[in-house]
Amino acid sequence: MASKTTLNAPNLEALGAARLAALLMEISEGNAVIKRRLRLELAGEQSPAEVARQIRKRLQTIARSHSFVDWQNRKALVDDLQAQRRAIVDQVAKRTPAEALDLMWRFLELAKPVLERADDSNGAIVGVFQAAVEDLGDIAEAARPDPTQLADETFRALLQNEYGQYDGLIQTLAPALGPVGLDHLKQRLVALSQEPVPKPAGKDRRIIGYGAGGPLYADEMAARARATSIRLALQRIADAQGDVDAFIAQYDEPARKLPRIAAAIARRLLAAGRAEEAWQIIEAAKRPRY
């Protein structure tokens, strides 16, 4: 049997509401994160609309901030972000999922500006946003948004994935997107792949480094990054649709012979009951390349 002094919920409940309230007031003194958390709980007792208003207000404040967050202040920022994320999931989503869906998108929009001004060497900050992406799937299924609109929102998010915060977005939203949304997202990505990346005039091109072939230009790196993002997104859509051929189409013939890629293709062919083709892919990868 646990001691009466063990820190657990039953022992704390035994203190009584008045004593707990006094302790919370004492603990929150000088701690802005705890104060905000308590205000969210109080707002939740009032109405979901009031919680949503408080969350939006806080998200706007975070978005306006430009101060650099070093490793010493990182935990406070992580705690603040987690408090807002949990409030969306625990207090808003259970009662008004459509409102929660919009709030979570607004929350995720903070990822890029926050990560640009913070030391996230331990990955704690981006981890909060990646957890929010996972939450988004359940919220979207409950909210049942128009799949085409959801696909458009997903497309915009994927274009802002500099820190990998949206890496799991397609997988988590696939059930809510459904066939219509996935097809629409695929069409938008294919259309984007066919658009040229703007190239500045020679004198305006910015060099960001040097490689074996000479200078590396910002516009070239942007074009490569966009092509990679589109390819990965189309692969994830192919997986969500169970379309092995669409997955394979994202690699050219030389790439399909690389062991890592050949193994990924073979696994999908085996899962689709196409064992002979899987074996051919593996055999091709075993042949020497010159």
Image (cartoon, helix red, strand yellow):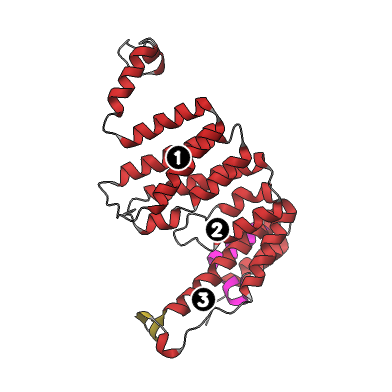
**Structural crowding at the residue carrying mark 2, measured as other residues with C-alpha within 10 Å and reported as few (<14), some (14–19) or many (≥20):** some
Report x, y in % for residue 133.
53, 48
Asked if the magenta segment contains residue 262, the reply would be yes
100 shown above or below 121 = above
Q: Which residue is mark 1?
A: 84
Which residue: 37% across, 51% down?
123
**Rounded to the nearest whole Å, what is the CA distance between mark 3 and mark 2?**
18 Å
Q: Amino acid at mark 3?
A: Ala
Residue 223: image tag: 3
Disc 3, disc 2: CB below 8 Å?
Answer: no
Which residue type carries mark 1? Gln
The answer to whether residue 245 is above or below residue 34 is below
The amino acid pointed to by label 2 is: Ala
**Element marked by disc 3:** helix
Q: Quadrant of residue 211?
A: bottom left
Q: Distance of mark 3 from mark 1, alpha carbons?
A: 35 Å
Residue sitting nearer the eye, 67 or 181: 67
Check if residue 44 falls in the magenta segment: no
Give how far across and how far down residue 95 sits, in percent: 61, 32
Q: Residue furthest bottom?
A: 202
Labels 3 and 2: the sequence-earlier one: 2
For the residues labelled 2 and 1, say whether their Cβ atoms are less than 8 Å apart: no
Which residue is label 2 attached to? Answer: 157
Q: State the extent of the magenta-drawn residues as a range.
A: 251-268
